[in-house]
Amino acid sequence: MFTLAGIGFTAPWLLLGLVALPILWLLLRAVPPAPVRRRFPGIALLLGLTDDDHQSDKTPWWLLLLRTLAVAAVIVGFAGPVLNPDNRLPGSGPMLVLVDGTWADARDWPRRIDRITAALDEAGRDGRTVALISLTDLPGGDLPFQSADSWAARLPGLTPRPWVASDGGVTGFTDRLSGSFETLWLSDGVAHPWREGLLTALEQRGPVTVFESPRPIFAMKPVTYDEGALSLTALRAAPGPEQAVEVTGHGRDPSGVERELARATVSFDAGAVQAALALSLPPELRNRITRFQIEGARSAAAVTLTDDALKRREVALISGRDDRESLQLLSPTHYLEQALQPTADLISGSLEDVLLANPDVIVLADVATVTGTEEQAIVDWIDAGGLLLRFAGPRLAASDISRDVEDALMPVRLRAGGRSVGGAMSWGEPKALRAFAEGSPFFGLEVPAEVTVSAQIMAQPDPNLADRVIAALTDGTPLVTRKRIGQGQVVLFHVTANAEWSTLPLSGLFVQMLERLAVSTRPAAPSAGDLAGTTWAPDQVLDAFGRVGDAGNLPGVAGEDLAAAVPSAATPPGLYAGEDRRIALNVTGAEAALSAAVWPARIAVEGLEHRRETPFKGALLALALMLLALDVLASLLLAGRLTGAGTTKRATRGAAAVLALALMLPGDGQAQSPDASPPDDDFAIQATSEVVLAHVITGDKQVDEVAQAGLVGLSDTLFQRTSIEPAAPIAVNLETDELSFFPFLYWPITPDQPQPSQEAYGRLNTYLRGGGMILFDTRDADIGGFGSGSVNGRKLQQLARPLDVPPLEPIPADHVLTRTFYLLQDFPGRHTSRDVWVEAAPADAQTVEGMPFRNLNDNVTPVVIGGNDWAAAWAVDSGGNRMFPVGRGYAGERQREIALRFGVNLMMHVLTGNYKSDQVHVPALLDRLGQ
Amino acid sequence: MTAAADLRADAEALAAPLPPLLADAQHLAHSVMLGAHGRRRAGAGDEFWQYRPAMPGDEARTIDWRRSGRSDAHFVQEKEWQAAQSVLLWVDGARSMGFASDKALPEKGARARLLAMAIAVLLIRGGERVGLSGLGLPPRSGPVQLLRLAAALAADGDAPEYGAPESRGMLARSRALFVSDFLGDPAPVVEALTKAADRGIKGAILQVLDPQEEAFPFDGRTIFESIGGSLRHETLKAGDLRARYLDRLAARKAMLRDLARATGWQYHCHHTADGAAPALLWLFGALEHDH
């Protein structure tokens, strides 16, 4: 190849064409621009006019230069200029082509094959023998030096593997090396521990050339579940500038089609090799995802399979006693909730409701009987793969269920009464657990000595009892029994789910047993102990390119091995299926780190950035085209066709502009993202720097003014009489304003106020659930009682329908509102109706020790509804005078005073929560303490 | 005939908003035809003819306030039309008129024919007699004459490169309207106008020009050809000719204006880029009043 100043030419003879350029210059100069023919009636006036100047027919020098440059660019372009031409000298002697053959090779495997082909071709031309070795598929014995042709025929069989060569394997290979040869090492670009030793060994045999692709290497750590969000971590080998990679989650949609279910962008900071992202997905979607992968990274490391660790099981908890007022620690499901809360989605509700949700597990804690229809529904559900987990308890022991005939929902027949051991009224010691037998799902779990059972229900000795016992006490009596129904099973714990009958729920064993039963979700990383005694069969395997394939008939792996396994030929990465669960073995482990391979300076590393031939032909031809386009414009300009009016001119001008635009190099077409509007900080600061009362803007100017004035009056009263010192009230627009700043909203009802939007209702419901209170005021208690179908009443119903309002009751005489600050009997505003409604007390709330207060739960009532037009009674104008008359004379002033006192009580109730209701019990508490 | 029908329809549309036009009857006696007095219809004259309710378009000064004062409505006193004027039109049909510099613009000839036809519509509606100069179509009144005029104007035949006014067949003391671009040889124009003035004919000359002819927006090496192709002029720098061309055009306009002043005619230059209605209004004024 002819080389000139570092630039080679593939067709140097074409450069002789440059000699012709001066001739072209002369020719172009001699020919004036072509004339334009125009029809013009005014020619009669032109006749006889002669040109002053005869010089303008020559083409101007700059146009000539432009054209000459364009032609020169064409000539040089076709001569094929190449930067860094490849002038390799032929080698001699045997050559070793070494391939790492790992998952990192897969990202540009075709290029590697091309490189190997090129190396084989070259070796073939030079008559050299070649050995082609993949480090993940090492042959035994000496290096197989053969002719290049025979290797070329076998090249399609060479594939990368989804694992990395082991240290031992490479050391063995290094020991077997002999003779001298040249090495071409196609490195995968990742640092491996054996890299240096192998390089040293190869260099002793001959020169080593390394080929490395500059394409970035990505890997993805296993996805973990952390506090409601999936934690995605991406790795890259080389720290570089900021970079964002797309991560997609794949799984089957409800119709069973594999598709992309989630997509997120993980951003590497500049210089960082690791990037994390917390991805929050709906549980239904999250449970469907089977793998995450980095988009565009074609390698097994960029794929991470998710196993059951991400699948949050839906567990329905149903207990026989539903007394929310009783003590938490005695609740039958307390320990179950504690054990399952971190790892499963709990569902509560009635049995019918729960069955509709089709949970994975239904837990019946001390539930003796279910209705016939429910039983059939449960059996069907178990048949389809459900797990019914039952716990014994006093009710079950006292019932006749499964006494004579085995109940469909019981694994065994039960003996009446159960037994109690080691208690105050019984002989003997509490029983310990027997070690779990082989075949039991609990096999391999350590039995702590401190777990004792003091009471249990007993199984009738039936022929099939022995098969159904999966855990027993030291005396052989069953502790856990199981029966399979269809694809599902019924499991009965013969003790309670709380600590009344045994200490089992207090121990870690309880959680482990629930895990083994697949009630709760397996922790992210199984330890060898967790998997002891189990066998796992590969279900799906990953290939090096990150594709998921069927495992075929690969042999099973023992659980202990699997727990400690790294991907290798024996344990290929993929999904391993056990009895009830699947465990993923990913290429990139949770502790994995990725770093780029570092080569000593003496090693020539071949790659994109080194000695890459850069042909200039395209660029030069494009330059020539651009110059010619400029020439078109310039010629039009000279010929007078680019200025002035006229259809033909306009058309040519348009065409020229289009031509020029089309040849412009494409710019960076990134759209600028619009600046996010700054949050309304002023409003937030105003609303939160002090306690602020707020009212809802109804759109009726007068009502809004009265509401504002009423809250001003109430604020003044609070300021004077109590330690609440509110700032000026704020009018709240439900559509735009943040509600969570306000402890209290006053909402007057007008017949024609607009219905809030869906988003506004969403915020209102959040507000109510988050402890906010809304005082609805229909302002019409003078013309109709509450709920009597007044216009405002109907509007209130319409407005409140989408709201999450609890059951209501007329305010009882002993409600805490009657005595949070003042003692009140009724709650007048401008009107004196007694119809004021608050959240109903729970049905099972009891009056405590004759005290007039109910033992209500913590919540302040989220709504107070009435029609007494309180704002009008509270309202003061700017001078501090009352805006509206209330009642007549002294009685009216008294009514206004009571109205203000109601406002004070209401605000106290809102701001102090259950403190005031608790205070009522102080005498009783002191009494109990023996004071 | 469709071209003629279109021309007629366009002209009617253009003339519709204007009140009937009566040519000035200054020299009534000379052009009056025998027995033409007392036409038994409203028109210009001295004798009372009738009162009629005032209509939009009537000038305020025409309202008869004495009659109107006796009722709630306004009335116009109409006089009996006593005589008709003859108006002769000459519209240049030469090849140079078939030029339009832009698709959006009408050809000069089309605009000229439209204006002539529109003024003819107005004149005929006013009871005047309108004809074409030359021997082809003598002046007559009545709507049928409009059809003949339209047909004659729309007829195209072998035309010369530049037109010359036809002064034959013009009645003495009548009125005339010449419409052309007047870019050709000015000698026939001078001759025709002088001859017409000698015979007591007064009228208007309307020069219709394309905006490109007014601006000469050319540059570079150009070969100019006449519309017929018989004339040709090559220049290497069209831009240099612009000033001299414009000088010549201005001289031509000045010559026409002076000629018109000398002969008692009126001169106006109209560009096809402008609307036709102002030109028609000018024609209305030029033919209505005595100057």
Image (cartoon, coloured by chain):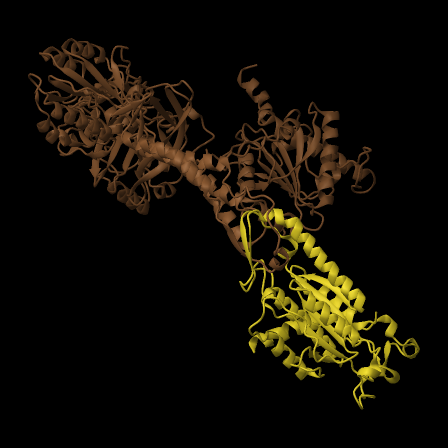
Q: Is A758 placed left or right of A723 in the picture?
A: left
**Percent of width and height locating residue B149:** 65, 78
- Write the residue at 74% across / 59% down: B254
Q: Nearer the viewer, residue A250 or A332?
A: A250
Q: Nearer the viewer, residue A482 or A225?
A: A225
Q: Nearer the viewer, residue B55 or A12?
A: A12
**Percent of width and height locating residue A642:** 54, 46
Height in image: A375 above or below A738?
below
Which residue is outermost to the bottom?
B35
Which chain's colour is brown? A
Q: Is A360 placed left or right of A924 in the picture?
A: left
Residue A384 seen anywhere in this rendered image of the structure = yes
Height in image: A511 above or below A24?
above
**Percent of width and height locating residue A132:** 13, 22
Q: Nearer the viewer, residue A372 or A565?
A: A565
**Quadrant for the C terminus of chain A in the image:** top right
Which chain's colour is yellow? B
**Percent of width and height locating residue A845:** 51, 33
Count of numbered marks: 0
Say which quarter of the image contains residue B142.
bottom right
**Quadrant for the N terminus of chain A in the image:** top left
Say which quarter of the image contains residue A871.
top right
Residue A457 seen anywhere in this rendered image of the structure = no
- Write the residue at 26% across / 40% down: A382
